[in-house]
């Protein structure tokens, strides 16, 4: 950690020499939170920042940046994979990334400003997110801990990056940041039901859309959800104002009854991984109760929905504290996002999923936006298809065919690594891939889907058998 902080300090010192810097970040929740943290810290240091978001940093994108940039360019939540290519441009790169660099074993001594936890014995997949890296950089840029108030965004970014999924709580440096945020009173954490929508969703919807673990007769089953609540004796509406009740509206006793009921239900149906229902949840104490900003997971979803619809600057403004115009716009985007998800799931339901030996897939063509095909794959795995196979979604994109896959944890335990499988298979057909063991994606040429599927089916088979 000491060495990591030294490098962070070196990055901060270099930035301080500038009057204006450019910042390039990844267009997802962690990328937006990273950019917000870094931008705030840099602005507080009296330096101007211009922020750009990119879907990925490939040679083309880097060239566009490289040709127009001079001085310092800060890369947050991306950059490590392209550090070799950056040398040919005139700008000085400062990289605050957490993705596994392609040459993690090689030394980074050539690069003074490369801050990536993987080089410092910290696992960037679950111990520190891009936002966490930006947060530590931010601490080095300030005196008297004045940037510690940015810790809540570091938690939102980490959760948005699914870093709390493996252990159902934040660990490693993420946890240190969490403790700082908690001491400061801006985040609280507790053990609770880990189902999305605690702050904003009516409880029956919250359960209906729950997917980890898959709850037979409840997940994706409206009728089943209603039956469940009447069985455990919980009324869905508030007795006084007849509003739909959310998780936060329930008494501790009612919550306990629901949790016990769910555990019983799982045991009865032989569900694997009941323990995944419960884990740590993170509440942003400064945000209004019942808003999507109050819960770290819901906040990260809000950020994602701005990014996926080409309005990352809106997400950036929210992550930096805008609660007026940008926040209003984001709520519209969130509504649109929900509509698109419903339409996407229905599309998959209608067209069906094809099951191969070790994987299953659907091809949405241009019926589903490539930016949400992964989420739809994730939603479909639990409701429409075999639960025990990875699901792969395809959608048209600018460069060919976007591939996005999700897998259940039980397969990861058996050795599945989707990122490796997709990367290897995509390479064979002149495409590329990346991501994590349970969620990964890539892009392949449009006419190579069949070949890619054969490869991937085989690759996944090798991993899990
Ligand atoms: Mn990230």
Image: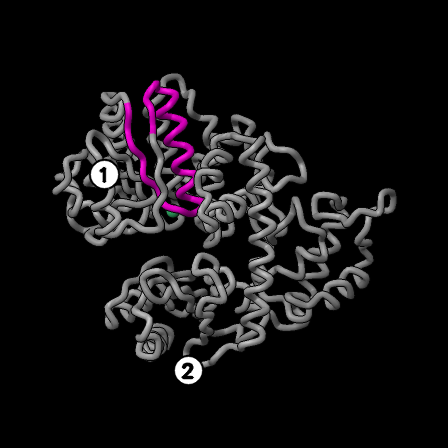
| Relative vertical location of residue 50 with respect to residue 87 in this rendering, above or below | above
| Relative vertical location of residue 448 with respect to residue 9 in this rendering, above or below | below
Q: Residue at x 38, y 26 (%)?
A: 41
Separation of marks 1 and 2 at Cα, in angstroms: 42 Å
Q: Residue at x 51, y 63 (%)?
A: 376
Identify which residue, 174 or 224, lies in the foreground: 224
Q: In which quarter of the image is residue 20?
A: top left
Question: Residue 243 vs residue 318: left or right?
Answer: right
Number of marks in the rendered image? 2
Q: Residues within 10 Å of mark 2 (few under 14, many from 20)?
A: few
Identify which residue, 54 or 267, lies in the foreground: 54
Q: Is mark 2 within 8 Å of ligand 1?
A: no
Q: Read off the residue under disc 2.
A: 357
Q: Where is residue 256 in the image (x, y as percent from the top left)?
A: 72, 51
Q: Is any atom of residue 163 visible in this view?
A: no
Q: Read off the residue under disc 1.
A: 114
Range drawn in magenta = 20-49
Q: Residues within 10 Å of mark 1 (few under 14, many from 20)?
A: many
The quarter of the rendered structure image containing the N terminus is top left
Q: Does the residue labelled 1 lie within 8 Å of ligand 1?
A: no
| Relative vertical location of residue 34 with respect to residue 18 in this rendering, above or below | below
Q: Where is residue 14 in the image (x, y as percent from the top left)?
A: 22, 26
Element under label 1? strand
| Relative vertical location of residue 436 with respect to residue 394 in this rendering, above or below | above
Is residue 31 one of those drawn in magenta?
yes
What is the number of the mark on residue 384? none
Element under label 2? loop
Is residue 238 one of those drawn in magenta?
no
């Amino acid at each position: 950690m000491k060495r990591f902080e030294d490098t962070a300090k070196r990055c901060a010192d270099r930035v301080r020499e500038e009057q204006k810097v450019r910042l390039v970040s990844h267009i997802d929740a962690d990328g937006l939170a990273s950019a917000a943290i870094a931008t705030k810290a840099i602005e507080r240091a009296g330096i101007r920042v211009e922020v750009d978001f990119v879907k990925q940093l490939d040679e083309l994108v880097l060239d566009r940046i490289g040709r127009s940039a001079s001085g310092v360019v800060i890369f947050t939540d991306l950059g490590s994979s392209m550090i070799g290519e950056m040398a040919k441009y005139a700008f000085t790169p400062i990289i605050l990334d957490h993705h596994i660099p392609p040459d993690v074993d090689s030394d980074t001594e050539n690069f003074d400003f490369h801050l990536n936890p993987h080089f410092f014995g910290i696992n960037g997949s679950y111990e520190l997110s891009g936002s966490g890296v930006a947060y530590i950089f931010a601490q080095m840029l300030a005196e008297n801990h004045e940037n510690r108030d940015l810790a809540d965004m570091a938690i939102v970014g980490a959760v948005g990056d699914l870093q709390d999924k493996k252990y159902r709580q934040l660990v490693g440096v993420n946890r240190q940041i969490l403790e700082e945020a908690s001491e400061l009173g801006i985040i609280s954490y507790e053990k609770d039901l880990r189902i999305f929508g605690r702050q904003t969703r009516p409880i029956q919807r919250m359960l209906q859309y729950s997917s980890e673990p898959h709850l037979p007769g409840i997940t994706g089953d409206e009728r089943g959800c209603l039956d469940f609540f009447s069985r455990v004796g919980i009324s869905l509406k508030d007795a006084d104002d007849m509003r739909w009740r959310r998780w936060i509206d329930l008494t501790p006793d009612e919550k306990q009854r629901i949790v016990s009921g769910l555990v019983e239900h799982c045991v009865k149906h032989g569900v694997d991984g009941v323990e995944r229902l419960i884990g740590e949840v993170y509440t942003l104490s400064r945000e209004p109760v019942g808003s999507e900003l109050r819960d770290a997971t819901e906040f990260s979803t809000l950020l994602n929905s701005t990014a996926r619809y080409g309005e990352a600057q809106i997400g950036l403004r929210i992550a930096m504290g805008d609660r007026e115009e940008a926040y209003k716009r984001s709520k519209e985007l969130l509504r649109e996002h929900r509509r698109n998800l419903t339409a996407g799931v229905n599309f998959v339901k209608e067209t069906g999923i094809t099951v191969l030996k070790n994987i299953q897939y659907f091809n949405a063509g241009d019926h589903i936006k490539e930016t949400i095909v992964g989420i739809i794959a994730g939603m479909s795995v639990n409701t429409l298809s075999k639960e025990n196979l990875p699901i792969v979604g395809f959608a048209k994109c600018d460069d060919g065919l976007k591939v996005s896959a999700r897998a259940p944890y039980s397969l990861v335990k058996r050795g599945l690594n989707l990122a490796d499988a997709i990367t290897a298979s995509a390479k064979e057909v002149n495409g590329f891939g990346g991501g994590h063991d349970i969620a990964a994606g890539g892009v392949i040429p449009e006419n190579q889907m069949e070949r890619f599927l054969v490869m991937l089916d085989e690759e996944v088979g090798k991993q899990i058998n």
